[in-house]
Image: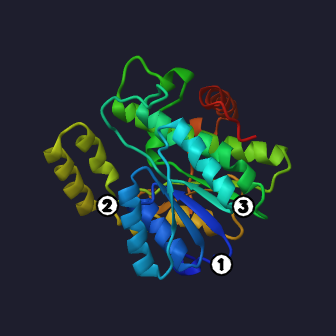
Amino acid sequence: MSWSTADIPDQSGRRVLVTGATSGIGYATALELLNRNADVLIAARNPEKAAKAAGEMSSRSGKAPEVVELDLADLASVQKAAEQLGEKYDRLDVLINNAGVMAPPYRETPDGFELQMGTNHLGHFALTARLMPLLSQAAQPRVVTVSSFMHKTVRGISQADFTPTSYRKWDSYGKSKLANLLFMHELGRRARAAGSPLLSAGAHPGYASTHLQAAGPELAGRPLQAKVWGAATRLVAQSAEAGAWPTLYAATLPDARPGLFAGPGFFDYRGAPRPARASSPAQDPELARNLWAWSVEATGVDPF
């Protein structure tokens, strides 16, 4: 039987934090969770965009999300946001690690890491670690990490990829998405070993029409290329709302199994979500353990 958003159970009483929720898949995810009565926190680095998105969500759902200022590329911002959340709330039921950047020109984070790896993986690794005290207070905590089918374009990852001496934007993007899945699996293994009820799951949106495709050319100062990318994506991709389905499936499925990786059912490209298959490197436990150790060293924090 095909899953749809109508299958999402009532989310009353669940507090959910969604990163990167001012547009695209994150916005669609947060809005649907509000419609299902969840208490939603939206984390974003741009306060103005976050306030606008929150206002739109409130008008559309009748329920206002809480805005959390967070720059995942900056580990100091991650720490500050987590501390503020710890002071305000007694628990967090679901963390959705959704935010990301795709194929920008070479840039470094304030901490000296390549931007895609620093944002897509290390920022979420540190955020998960710093929010673990809140997650541990929930009865059935869940962390959903959003990857991409682009993780299949690379065969591995090394510590040197955090600060590469040569840069290929799509290779770095693929490695950051591979890191997302390796982290998802290792988080689940360590939670089980620690006797924690935390469920770690993953998702990928297939090919969805969002601002992500145009963001790289915009950062490179190529507005025409950004417009072409945006137009082409809108022509052939599914909507951002449909792209959010795998994330919502992984976040709300009552009987989700540890390590669930959800994606669109039609050749990983589009359609209703179902369990997807990750690449062999993404399921390599030794590589996942190594990545975890490198990430602890890079961020100075350890989720488990």
Residue under circle 3?
91
Q: Amino acid at mark 1?
A: Ser
Q: Split into 4 quadrants, where in the image is the N terminus?
A: bottom right
Characterize the local packing of mark 2: few (<14), some (14-19) or many (20 or more) Cα atoms within 10 angstroms: some
x and y percent of residue 263 in the render?
A: 51, 58
Residue 98 visible:
yes
Q: In this rendering, would 31 be left or right of 53?
A: right
Mark 3 or mark 2: whose residue is earlier in sequence: 3
Amino acid found under the numbered disc labelled 2: Ala
What x and y, as percent, mark residue 39?
A: 60, 71
At x 86%, y 49%, the residue is 195
Find the distance from the CA under tag 3 to the CA under tag 2. Answer: 37 Å
Q: Given the image, on which type of amino acid does mark 3 rest?
A: Arg
The residue wearing badge 2 is 237
Q: Is label 2 or label 1 in front?
A: 1
Query: Residue 128 in the image: x percent, y percent?
Result: 64, 46
Is residue 283 positioned above or below 136 on the image?
Answer: above
Where, by quadrant of the figure, is residue 50 drawn? bottom left
Indicate the position of residue 69 as horizontal and vertical percent values: 49, 53
In this image, 138 relative to 27: left or right? right
N-term-proximal mark, 1 vs 3: 1
Label 2 element class = loop
Tell me the distance, in whole angstroms, between the alpha carbons under discs 2 and 1.
32 Å
Q: Mark 1 highlights which residue?
A: 12
* CB within 8 Å, label 2 to label 1: no
Q: Is residue 240 visible?
A: no
Mark 2 / mark 1, whichever is N-terminal: 1
Disc tally is 3
Could you classify mark 3 by the number of other residues whose Cα lies within 10 Å: few (under 14), some (14-19), or many (20 or more)?
many
